[in-house]
Image (tube, grey):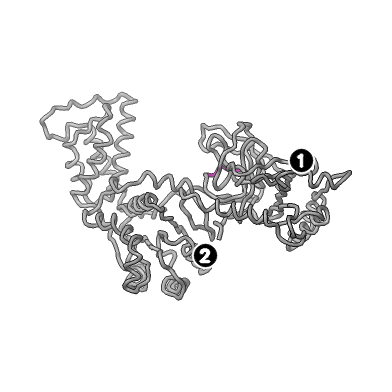
Amino acid sequence: MSDSEPFTFIAEERAGEAPRLFEGFLDRSSARIPQPDVPLVTELRNQYPELIVTTIPVDNVNLLEFAAAGFAQAELDSDDEPLVRWRGFAPPAQRHGRGQLAEARFFAKYRYKWNNENFILYTVILGLTALQYVLKEPHGDETTSGNSTITDSLIRAIGEWSMTDEELIYVFDNGFWSASKGLWEQVQKASWDKVILDPKTKKELTQVSGKFFDGREVYEEYGVPWKRGLIFHGPVGNGKTISIKALMHTLYQRDPKVPCLYVKSAPYTYNLRGVFQFARMMAPCLLILEDIETIVTASTRSYFFNEVDGLENNDGILMIATTNYLDRLDPGLSKRPSRFDRKYLFPLPNLDERVLYCEYWYGKLKSKPAIDFPRLLCRPIADLMDDFSFAYMQEAFVATLLVLARDQEDDEFQTSVYNRGTRDEEQYEFYRVMKAQVKTLRDEMGAPEASPEMFTVPPTPGSNANAFGGAFSIATPGRAGNFAVGSGTIQGSGVSDQSGNGRRTAFLQQGIDGDGMSFSASFALRRSFPVRM
């Protein structure tokens, strides 16, 4: 095929009207049938009897995503087949940004080229089913009723490519795995230098992952399973999240990188099965179970214990569970060493740690001439914040800076005179404002506090889905979906950018345009896309 002109293998053998699938698509989309693939494949084989027809689910390997990343070419062919699409407006990610026109395609035909081989590609969405049909002429002793080795090579190439991007964090939520580029970018900003903990605990945590992932031979020598479990516990806002982010950052700096899997919710036994199946496939890996008390409940505890301690191989899995309420955990979790063998307490910071945190803010603000915050205020401010968590301390600093910024704009207060050599902290406006903010926060500390999510994870397609209301919505790049973007020649069976920027952009979970925006269609598949299993 590589020696022929594109698609002459069809054109030379046919005269008159080109084959069409649309009538079959229209008929199937107008009828109530349990399996749309069978009649569509039959129709394609009737229309193209000389070609091999291969059906590929979009959420398994995505041909248009592969093309949009620059590894293949996909050109829309609307001459022979009509294009079924929705047009809409995708609002900006931020209020002052610019929105984009977007397009959702339910039926489209493409000329597809990869590795000097030409294919015909149909993309079809019927209800919640999104399929791709790849047509290729037989080679050698292949028959039209068998498989195409060239199409199989394309599928393998896309599958292997989809697993090579290491700059991702896998997130399990709403029953499905998705992959988040945005969360990975959050983690890259974390480091152990920004973590304030008891020195002994911090030293252990910085070493624990390295000892585990470098210690496979030691585990094998002693005949014990190569797995570990840690529990991070303590009141809200005292460093569990930032410590895990710093740990994840460390793992992505290793060679080879260690993938990180983050479980937001898994309330059912079949969810737990999906979690551990994927963890075993990705091992060695870090598996994070946020708010473990919501995952291991009375209805799922036995199944969870079987997944952890059962007959299946969990080698290479380092589990970290977090909880704000250690006393609420099932004793089978908190008191069984073979499951979680170490517990790390993240208590309220002591005076020395509060001073270190104030010095951290001093370092951030010392280059701001409008902020009169000398280092000598760190200890007095730390004294004010007794019984504060790091989260409350951060809120106090942020609130203080907001008040100072407002006062400067209103010009209602004169700047305090800074007399060097004195330790009378009351002369500093920064201290006086801080003292007032601390009092306000302390008055509020008695109110019940909701447990925040560990990470802010970008939304996935359809998460706000009414199937027809708000069909076009902004989302954040992740990985593995059925949306394509670009210049108008690479279009997906979901949403495509029509802004005319002329760029082909390698994208991750949904389509993203040249300005970094991405689009999701709530009608396409109203769930998170599963990571390839």
Of the two numbered discs 2 and 1 on the same chain, state the one appearing first in sequence: 1
CA separation in Å, label 2 and label 1: 40 Å
Is residue 402 a member of the stretch shown in magenta? no
Of residue 351 and residue 50, the one placed in the foreground of this image is 50
- What secondary structure characterizes most of the magenta part? strand
Q: Nearer the viewer, residue 207 or 522?
A: 207
Amino acid type at mark 2: Gly
Task: Report which residue position mark 1 lands on.
Answer: 78
Q: Which residue is mark 2?
A: 274
Q: In this image, 114 relative to 36: left or right?
A: left
| Rendered location of residue 506, percent (x, y) | 56, 41
For image coordinates 35% across by 70% down, the residue present is 220
Secondary structure category for the residue under label 2: helix
Residue 326 is tagged as none
- Across and down, in percent, residue 46 comes to 83, 56
Direction from residue 406 to residue 313 in the image, left or right? right
- Image quarter in which the C terminus is found: bottom right
At 44% from the left edge and 62% from the top edge, which residue is drawn?
A: 283
In this rendering, position of residue 230 left or right of residue 58: left
SS category of the residue bearing label 1: loop
Rendering coords of residue 110 (x, y %): 72, 44
Q: Position of residue 377 (x, y in %)?
A: 18, 37
Q: Is residue 32 visible from the viewing direction of this image? A: no
Can I make out residue 299 in this image?
A: yes
Above or below — where is 304 with respect to 443?
below
Q: Which residues are magenta?
A: 472-476
Which residue: 83% across, 48% down?
Answer: 19
